[in-house]
Image: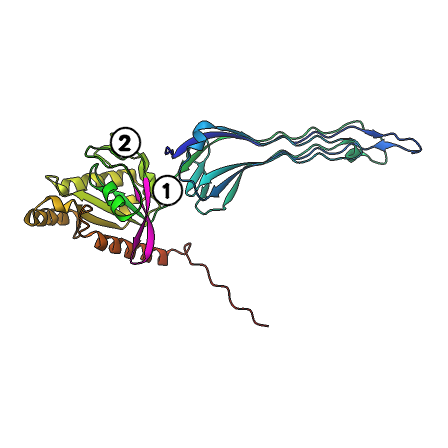
Amino acid sequence: MKFLDEAKVYIRSGDGGAGSVSFRREKFIEFGGPDGGDGGRGGDVWAECVDGLNTLIDYRYQQHFKAKTGVHGMGRNMAGGRGADVVLKVPVGTQIFDEDKETLIADLTHPGERVLLAKGGNGGFGNAHFKTSTNQAPRRANPGLEGIERWIWLRLKLIADAGLVGLPNAGKSTFLAAVSAARPKIADYPFTTLHPNLGVVRVDSREFVMADIPGLIEGAHEGIGLGDRFLGHVERCRVLLHLVDATQEDPAEAYRVVRGELEAYGAGLDEKPEVVALSKADALPPDEIEKKKKALARVAGKTPVVLSSASGAGVEGALRVLWRIIEEGRTSDPNDVPSRKAESWTP
């Protein structure tokens, strides 16, 4: 399945049905009169957050969504039926923006959430609605109101507990493949990862979700390389795991480059809790690893974790550190309170 995290779609709610002009004329009925029914209301356009989706690729092939028009009113006081609604099913973590791409309409973060994007037009009144004591045979009816049309942007920001950041070929995809069942593409050339990947990580009988995004290079915030467009997928993460390749000549400079891009991007990424790790430790002798560890600790202001995804050394320790930070964040977040158990019923 292809990955798509942004789509522009056109939506239009249904027009209201027109009212009817009709008169009752039946045999053996002495007095007739108006009996035109009202028109039905037009269908609405909704967005619904559902499980089982992790991309907006469906909106690459269909960009126009129109709800049905309400049924017109008929004689014998028969009102028209309501037009069918249209529901846009989107993955968890989808944000909906107006056409200007700045006005946030909704942020759907839980399955089952729904938001009304365009309300259907009201149906018109039939001539029976206008009957009065002084106007007993009205010959007019209202047309239905027109629906609402607009362009909107759908932007997906994957929901994960931990995010992997680093330069290209820092070992992010290898780490995700080692700690989860995810199978991202791994190769010995830069920018192997072209779209974010998610994996469920299990440590000490506990689970959390980890996101791997394409690597950053200097100038990514200006569009160099793949740019920073995928950084939105780690905005919701509680902690970042910053992987630095130990085989590089200057790990400290590699750390500075990525931190600079996080600060340039904004959105609070540079303020998130960060765990720094020196990856690919199996490729160098211990004395060289110790030397680069100290250099990285000086620029990062914290002691980095030394690990190797290939041999598994240090991986469990890094995961436990990540889980401890995630658990602290969940405890302090008032919107992430575990559901209370139902109290037992007593007479």
Residue 100: in sight, yes or no?
Answer: no
Residue 61 picture location, percent across and down: 45, 27
- Which of these two is toward me, 225 or 90? 90
Quarter of the picture containing the C terminus is bottom right
User: Disc 2 marks which amino acid?
Assistant: Leu
- Which of these two is toward me, 54 or 205? 205
- Residue 210 lies in the magenta stretch: yes
- Residue 208 lies in the magenta stretch: yes
- For label 1, the residue is 158
Residue 309 picture location, percent across and down: 20, 46
- For label 2, the residue is 226
Residue 200: in sight, yes or no?
Answer: yes
Real-space Cα distance between discs 2 and 1? 18 Å
Q: How many numbered callouts?
A: 2
Q: Dot 1 lies on which element?
A: loop
Residue 261 picture location, percent across and down: 24, 38
Left or right of residue 81: residue 196: left
- Which of these two is toward me, 187 or 212? 187
Please tell me which residue is depicted at 32% across the width and 45% down the height of the picture.
Answer: 199
Q: Dot 2 lies on which element?
A: loop
Left or right of residue 164: residue 74: right
User: Disc 1 marks which amino acid?
Assistant: Leu
Question: Magenta part of the protein: which range?
Answer: 197-214
Q: How is the image coloured?
A: rainbow
Left or right of residue 21: residue 304: left
**Image height check: is 84 above or below 234?**
above
